[in-house]
Amino acid sequence: MTPTITAFESSPDRGMGLARDTRVRWALEEVGQPYDVRLVSFKAMKEPAHLALNPFGQIPTYEEGDLALFETGSIIIHIAERHAGLLPKDENARARAITWMFAAVNTVEPPILELQNAKLLEGDKPWTKDRLPVIVDRIRDRLRQLSARLGGADWLDGAFSAGDLMMVHVLQRLKPSGILNEFPPLAAYVARAEARPAYKRAFDAQLAVFTGKPPTG
Ligand SMILES: N[C@@H](CCC(=O)N[C@@H](CS)C(=O)NCC(=O)O)C(=O)O
């Protein structure tokens, strides 16, 4: 059965791929599962039909038969459990890959989102000027730790996994700030992931929503 995901009708990042539907598109591309997309407006996201799928009125959602999911972590684990390619077969390695997914969204992403919110939503507040360096230092701490763990490896734990997919998508949000480039092994890690054909297909598909032109290739 072909799953249907939801995505922004009008992407706030103008197709940079930062909206979280890109994670789900990428996971589906990695495992070779075709999917449909239903675009939703900001207004529709807060209306009952969408709230029934995601009580927080957000994208992406995932529908497959009578199953409806929200939260990208849960959606990607669901995809990875049903298809080969995103989680290792070995039970311990699988648990470690899932640990990296949680580390991405629970440990690395929060200060990155804090920075984005401070700049975009609170940029005009009197406290923002003093707050920004504190947040940036928190991000640098996490990136230093992550970079130390990655070392010279290509991926976080053996072969590419859903843990890398999630971590890379979280790190991409830092690109406009320039902070990622302070950590060349992490910048190279992100570039390596972006070179994956599955990522390119996912990126092109979300960009096509913004440009209105169907993806090439
Ligand atoms: N923890 C959720 C976060 C979902 C989320 O923040 N979605 C954003 C788009 S990337 C959204 O819908 N924002 C609009 C809003 O919150 O009104 C997940 O991983 O799925």
Image (spheres, helix red, strand yellow):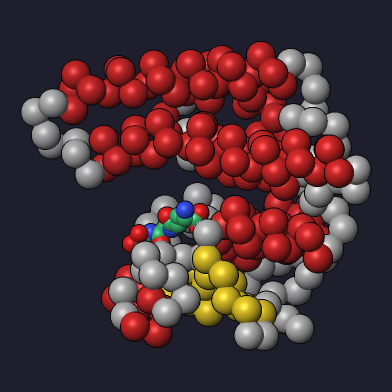
Left or right of 55, for residue 206: right
In this rendering, the answer to whether 30 lies above or below 180 is below
Residue at the spot 50% in from the left edge and 50% down from the top edge: 18
Residue 145 percent coordinates (x, y)? 59, 16
In what quadrant does ligand 1 lie? bottom left
In this rendering, the answer to whether 96 lies above or below 143 is below
In this rendering, the answer to whether 38 lies above or below 150 is below
Residue 45 percent coordinates (x, y)? 36, 74
Left or right of 4, for residue 179: left
Q: Nearer the viewer, residue 215 or 190?
A: 190
Residue at the spot 67% in from the left edge and 38% down from the top edge: 99
Residue 103 in which image quadrant: top right
Left or right of 183, for residue 15: left
Residue 49 percent coordinates (x, y)? 40, 84
Say whether residue 154 is visible. Answer: yes
Residue 120 in which image quadrant: top left
Residue 50 percent coordinates (x, y)? 41, 78
Residue at the spot 46% in from the left edge and 65% down from the top edge: 59
**The C terminus, quarter of image:** bottom right
Q: Nearer the viewer, residue 113 or 200?
A: 113
Left or right of 153, for residue 216: left
In this rendering, the answer to whether 202 lies above or below 187 is below
Q: In the displayed image of the protein, which residue is found farthest to the left?
A: 126
